[in-house]
Image (cartoon, rainbow, N blue to C red):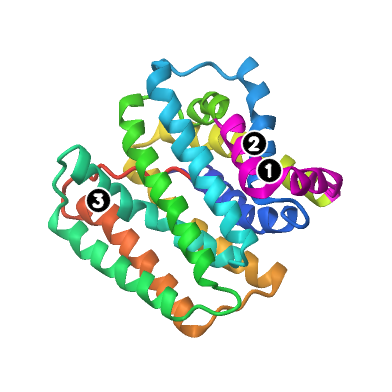
């Protein structure tokens, strides 16, 4: 990759890593499911300028429901439950582990030996995170974030039927299936009173957070990312996403003063190492991995 394109990849990593802090700040006073629903409602209008991916609606729907509604509904709920933004960015990487497991169960894709090693390392990391939970790593937040990672992993497998479609196109057009389910869940779980109160408290921080997640994290991020994926093999570009939780953790520490317990921090590092083995291991053994790692 050229230095300019490496700089572009690092810019996307920075945007996606800081995204967790931005979400944290926007959640103040706004119910998480309602906040996620508003985010994707703001993405829907961009179908007017983003070409529809050439995939069937029946294949697009599960991608939107799993990758967007499921992943971010659980992620926002985890952070609203007190999970630190940096730790959330790390735990969400467990999607690579879940992708391998779901693909093995549904698609009969047998994991490679090196991926099994990575899965073991990642699981050990998750155990450490859970055992080292503190005020910055509440158990309910960990479990909700893992549910988001599971939904993302299932979305990765569903996206196999959309092979060749751009991440931006899937995000924008898949958002058609996101707001109504999230608004309905918000009504049932958070209640109309909390929804009304959240809308009343939807101030500058929430507006700025929504603008960042919609424009920078979704539209700008994926536009740059898809350009890089079009220039280079995926194996050269995708590993940059492993830097996202590093930026997320550093941003949480710098801007929010988040300092998790040592065991939770060590578990997060071990989880990230396991994900790196799952994603990069087959490549360095001269084989291709089928794990997708969109953000």
Q: Marks 2 and 1: in contact by CB < 8 Å?
A: yes
Name the residue located 25 percent from the left edge and 62 percent from the top edge.
119
Front residue of 98/4: it is 98
Magenta range: 178-204
Identify residue for label 3. 101
How crowded pointer 3 is (Cα within 10 Å; few <14, some 14-19, many 20+) is rated as many
The numbered mark at residue 34 is 1
Quadrant for the N terminus in the image: top left
Name above or below for residue 292 compared with residue 146. above
Tell me if I can see residue 36 in this picture: no
Q: Which one is closest to the eye, mark 2 or mark 3?
A: 2
Tell me if I can see residue 98 in this picture: yes
How crowded pointer 2 is (Cα within 10 Å; few <14, some 14-19, many 20+) is rated as many
Residue 18 covered by magenta stretch: no
Q: Marks 3 and 2: in contact by CB < 8 Å?
A: no
Q: CA distance from mark 1 to mark 2?
A: 6 Å
Name the residue located 70 percent from the left edge and 69 percent from the top edge.
256
Reading the chain from its start, which is encountered first: label 1 or label 3? Answer: 1
Reading the chain from its start, which is encountered first: label 1 or label 2? Answer: 1
Front residue of 84/295: it is 84
Q: Secondary structure at mark 1?
A: helix
Does residue 126 appear left or right of residue 256 in this picture?
left
Identify residue for label 2. 183
């Amino acid at each position: 990759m050229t230095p300019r394109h490496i700089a572009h990849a690092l810019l996307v990593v920075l945007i996606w890593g800081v995204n967790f802090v931005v979400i944290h700040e926007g959640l103040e006073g706004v119910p998480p499911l309602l906040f996620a629903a508003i985010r994707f409602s703001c993405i829907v209008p961009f179908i007017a300028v983003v070409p529809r991916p050439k995939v069937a609606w029946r294949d697009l729907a599960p991608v939107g429901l799993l990758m967007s509604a499921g992943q971010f509904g659980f992620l926002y709920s985890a952070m609203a439950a007190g999970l630190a933004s940096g730790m959330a960015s790390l735990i969400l990487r467990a999607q690579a582990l879940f992708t391998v497991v779901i693909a093995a169960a549904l698609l009969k894709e047998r994991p490679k030996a090196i991926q099994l090693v990575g899965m073991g390392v990642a699981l050990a990391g998750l155990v450490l995170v859970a055992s080292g939970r503190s005020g910055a790593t509440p158990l309910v937040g960990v479990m909700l974030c893992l549910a988001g990672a599971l939904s993302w992993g299932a979305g990765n497998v569903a996206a196999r039927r959309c092979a060749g479609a751009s991440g931006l196109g899937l995000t924008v057009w898949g958002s058609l299936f996101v707001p109504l389910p999230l608004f309905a869940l918000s009504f049932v779980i958070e209640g109309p009173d909390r929804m009304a109160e959240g809308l009343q408290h939807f101030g500058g921080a929430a507006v700025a957070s929504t603008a960042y997640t919609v424009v920078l994290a979704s539209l700008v991020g994926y536009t740059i990312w898809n350009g890089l994926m079009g220039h280079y093999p995926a194996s050269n570009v995708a590993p940059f996403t492993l830097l996202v939780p590093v930026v997320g953790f550093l941003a949480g520490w710098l801007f929010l003063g988040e300092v998790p317990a040592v065991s939770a921090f060590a578990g997060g590092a071990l989880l990230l190492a396991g994900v790196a083995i799952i994603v990069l291991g087959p490549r360095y053994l001269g084989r291709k991995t089928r794990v997708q790692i969109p953000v």
